[in-house]
Amino acid sequence: MSTGRGYAVWHFRSVDFGPEIRRYMERIESTFEPFGGEWIVHGTHPEVLEGPWSADLVIIGFPSITAARDWYASPAYQDILELRVNHADSQVVLLEGVPQGYQAAETIAKLVVG
């Protein structure tokens, strides 16, 4: 059982910054704050070091992956979801962060067979 934080990550290729996206942006914070959500990355462009990149990222951090799931499924977020979906070319994923003190050797040990 992991004790890592949870993250909601958006990969935006394009956004129509019309009134619907503005309403989405005005309301989104009130949907994630009750779940302990906070902005990690928003409104910045990545500094690309390797490979092609043509998108922006948005990341919201949560105390746990369960909190991130509960937020995404919440009526408050579902109520504004179409404002983004219908006006942006994007993907959204939820990720579970690693617990404090994590070492890469823990994953390597799981990959070693037999």
Image (cartoon, rainbow, N blue to C red):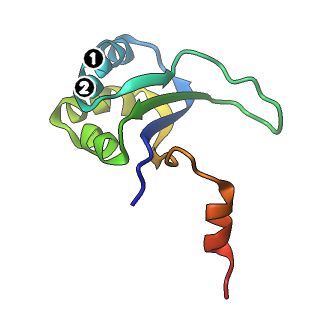
Residue that badge 1 annotates: 27
Callout 2–callout 1 Cβ contact below 8 Å: yes
Label 2 environment density (alpha carbons within 10 Å; few <14, some 14–19, many ≥20):
some
67, above or below 14, in the image: below
Relative side of 72 to 14, left or right: left
Dot 2 falls on a residue whose secondary structure is helix
Task: Single out the mark in the foreground, 2 or 1.
Answer: 2
Q: Residue furthest front?
A: 101
Query: Based on the displayed image, in which of its 4 quarters is residue 35 positioned?
Result: top left
Q: Quadrant of the C terminus?
A: bottom right
Picture coordinates of residue 36, whole percent (x, y): 30, 29
Q: Residue furthest right?
A: 50
Q: Which mark is residue 77?
A: none
Residue 74 appears in the figure:
yes
The amino acid type, in three-letter code, at marker 2 is Thr
Q: Nearer the viewer, residue 11 or 3?
A: 3
Name the residue at 77% across, 28% down. 48
**Residue bearing mark 2:** 31
Residue in front for this viewpoint, 81 or 113: 113
Q: Residue at x 27, y 37 (%)?
A: 71
The N terminus lies in which quarter of the figure?
Answer: bottom left
Depth check: 17 or 24 in front?
A: 24
Q: Residues within 10 Å of mark 1 (few under 14, many from 20)?
A: some
Q: Is residue 53 above or below residue 39?
A: below
Left or right: residue 99 compared with residue 106: left
Distance in Å between CA atoms under marks 2 and 1: 7 Å
Q: Residue drawn at (38%, 18%), measured in percent from left and top?
A: 21
In the visual, does 52 lie left or right of 84? Answer: right
The single residue placed furthest to the left in the displayed view is 75
Is residue 86 among the parts visible in the rendering? no
